[in-house]
Amino acid sequence: MNIILVIFDSLRKDCLSVYGRPYWGEVKTPHFDAFAEQSLVMTRAYPEALPTLPARRAIYTGKKVYPFHEGDFRQKGDFVGAPGWGPIPEKQATLAEILSKAGYRTALISDVYHMFKPSKNFWRGFHQWTFLRGQETDPARSGPRLSQKEIDYWLPKELQNEQSIQFITQCILNMRDRVREEDYFAPRVLREAALWLEQNQDADSFFLTIESFDPHEPWLVPPHYVRMYLDDLSIPEQVKSAYADQALSDQLLRRTQANYSAAVTLCDRWFGFFLEQMRVLGLLDNTLILFTADHGHSIGDRGFCGKRGYPSMPEVFDIPLFIRFPGAEHAGTVSDMFVQHIDITATILDMAGVEPPEPIDGVPFIEDALAGRPGQRDHVTVAWGTYPTVITRKWWFNCTVLGTQCRLYDLEAADPFARDIASEHPDVLEEMFAYAINDAVGGFPDWLIEMARKGTDAPGCTVLAARK
């Protein structure tokens, strides 16, 4: 059996109709929706650690990243991001290494440039790894520089500062010659993945990982996709988040929502292209496909644009997870058991019949999901910097590793996140924080505790002070 793992960065769960719709309206995803209909759909899937690189450490190893032991990175060639923002520890075996040794032909097709920065090693174990250049601030080009007129076109005046100007300048430099839809990022990734399938038809069995940075910002998409969601393209461009409380006008927010929706639909269209390649090559009947995201993104939800670990919210922390079995067996099955990124790793190994060289933290979930059982987890703890989030069927709890700044929401309420009820339930706070402590195997590292005390964490590029 072949195995394909598809990860879209910043894909909101509610943009897929099987899960609902975002608050600003329907997003057109016919190919994602058709794929969901052919799949086992997991409704309570969550990351283990966030943001981008910690999430991929968890997926690629099946090992817990929380509470960021060996996670205080300060590496040349990269900014100092949130805790855990670094390479996979050398002593941990990767999914690609394990499956390669078991006889699988392995490949990684990715435009997630954080994975390929100096000192990173996320391609370890793949027989082929293909890095498609130019996303975000990847230094793919050095000139010519943007004029002020161009900066003003792409970046609203209210969002302009030294950092945002540097960001948009590099983004547009990298995109200058993209004039056809096929030249944009999601099409390039999925076309390259389709080409890999064609070139590797001789493999007895393969493991292909497809990493699309889209629909992550900047939302640079062909105009015909934006027109699906916005009648008036004279509204100024708005392609990035301020990572702050919403300061955009209603008009610019509408443009932001349209651009994000357009980016999702672009991803959907080319995912459909990739699936058609699989059909033509006869791979849909002998391939297991897992489809997920690292996290979502706030697009004006609750007055915020961006992503962050505190206060944590479902639009960022809830993730889609579909598993399509060979021949679309078990199509239409839905499971509400708790699963996390590390469980994807365990499930892939279990389905491949391959034992990891040492125990991992993930738990295979297919058998329980298909049987309608609740699974082995009664809660999940999701780590983001110094702010763990604990989620049960009843409660959503968010605090610091010191047990301070507690937030509590009742998931059984009509509008769960309308009101923080932490002050009303001190006993629940104790119970939820006990989960966070218990899941922090080995305890919180001293440097993380000190970071929480100083308030110097930078969870997801928010307005909180960045680490030094």
Image (cartoon, rainbow, N blue to C red):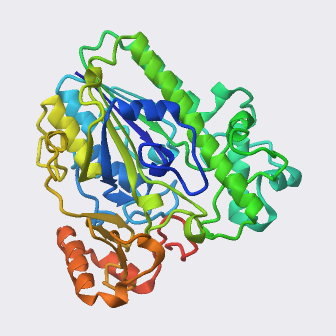
- Residue drawn where x is 54% and y is 76% of the image: 464
Q: Is residue 33 left or right of residue 344?
A: right
Q: Position of residue 428 (x, y in %)?
A: 25, 82
Whether 169 is drawn above or below 2: the answer is: below
Q: Residue furthest front?
A: 414
- Residue drawn where x is 77% and y is 67% of the image: 158
Residue 279 appears in the figure: yes
Image quadrant in which you'd find residue 162: bottom right
- Numbered circles on residues, count: 0
Residue 132 appears in the figure: no
In this view, the residue in front, 34 or 116, is: 34
Which image quadrant: the N terminus?
top left
Whether 365 is drawn above or below 419: the answer is: above
Whether 220 is drawn above or below 384: the answer is: above
Q: Is residue 210 left or right of residue 217?
A: left
Q: Position of residue 124 (x, y in %)?
A: 33, 38
Whether 204 is drawn above or below 133: the answer is: above
Q: Is residue 144 left or right of residue 132?
A: right
- Residue drawn where x is 19% and y is 50% of the image: 362
Q: Position of residue 178 (x, y in %)?
A: 71, 31
Q: Position of residue 392 (x, y in %)?
A: 26, 67
